[in-house]
Image: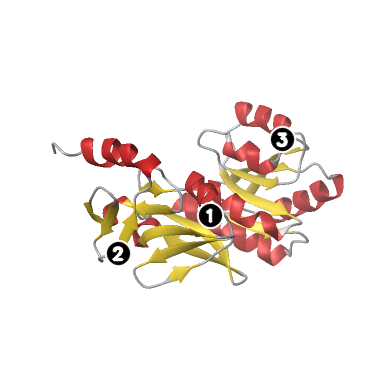
């Protein structure tokens, strides 16, 4: 059984290239080639699409925004001319991220990932996120993080055995993380709720003994969200 595939790219030359790559692969059935997100949305409404090969830089709706706003989107392979989009793309857990120009062998490896995803029974996956540091995308499991600290133009992501320091702001990182797992306790600190051992008036004390200050504006939120909600359990 072939994999119903949709191509989205607003560049006619790349539409041709992607069409050839899809048609060369015996596992894929090309349903349509679209030049905009709205064209693609109509195809999703009328066909059982299992795979989207999607450019990122399109207007008025980018490929990333299109996928982010679909409820339960098909498996997605992002294609782009700019590596810098990679971290943002992993918000939607694509099957792969390919940088143009695309080698046929690299594209086929992506399709092999698709095949495995569709045919294998998935193991439970721990929640994770990616950060860009030292020219590498590092995967960090949520459960490994003790706390996150703002440090100028960087954030310190502290795990039990390592400290990462990617560029960025703690507010932007907070927006990408699950708010029910991490708790903002200070304008400069996020803590993993399961790492908390004690909460005093002015500090959160982690299980490893680390003391994290509580900001005045976050004190009531900690009381209501982290303590009151579970005190009677």
Residue position for label 3: 61
Disc 1 element: helix
The answer for how far apart the CA atoms under marks 1 and 3 are is 28 Å
Secondary element at image label 3: loop
Q: Of the residues under marks 2 and 1, which one precedes in the sequence?
A: 1
2 vs 1, front mark: 2
**How much space separates mark 2 and mark 1, taking CA atoms?**
45 Å
Residue at the spot x=39%, y=40% of the render? Answer: 217
Query: Which disc number belongs to residue 210?
Result: 2
In percent of width and height, residue 163 lies at 44, 70
Q: Secondary structure at mark 2?
A: loop
Within-10-Å neighbours for mark 3: few <14, some 14–19, many 20+: some
The residue under the point 85% across, 44% down is 12
Q: Position of residue 85 (x, y in %)?
A: 67, 54
- Comes first in the chain, label 1 or label 3: 3
Please, which colouring scheme is shown? secondary structure
- Horizontal and vertical percent for residue 44? 62, 31
Residue 115: numbered disc: 1
Q: Is residue 153 left or right of residue 198?
A: right
């Amino acid at each position: 059984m072939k994999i119903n595939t949709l191509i989205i790219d607003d560049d006619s030359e790349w539409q041709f290239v992607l069409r050839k790559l899809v048609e060369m692969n015996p596992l894929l059935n090309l349903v349509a080639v679209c030049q905009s997100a709205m064209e693609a949305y109509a195809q999703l409404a009328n066909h059982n699409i299992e795979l989207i090969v999607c450019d990122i830089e399109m207007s008025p709706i980018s490929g990333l925004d299109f996928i982010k706003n679909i409820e339960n989107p098909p498996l997605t392979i992002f294609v782009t001319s700019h590596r810098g989009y990679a971290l943002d793309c992993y918000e939607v857990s694509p099957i792969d991220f390919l940088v143009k120009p695309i080698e046929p062998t690299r594209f086929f490896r992506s399709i092999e990932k698709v095949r495995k995803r569709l045919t294998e029974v998935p193991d439970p996956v721990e929640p994770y996120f990616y950060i860009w540091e030292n020219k590498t995308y590092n995967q960090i499991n949520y459960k490994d993080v003790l706390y996150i600290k703002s440090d100028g133009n960087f954030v310190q992501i502290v795990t039990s055995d390592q400290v990462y320091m990617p560029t960025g702001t703690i507010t932007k990182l907070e927006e990408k993380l699950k708010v029910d797992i991490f708790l903002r306790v200070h304008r400069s600190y996020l803590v993993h709720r399961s790492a908390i051992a004690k909460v005093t008036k002015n500090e959160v004390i982690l299980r490893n003994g680390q003391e994290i200050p509580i900001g005045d504006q976050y004190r009531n939120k900690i009381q209501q969200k982290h303590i009151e909600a579970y005190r009677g359990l």
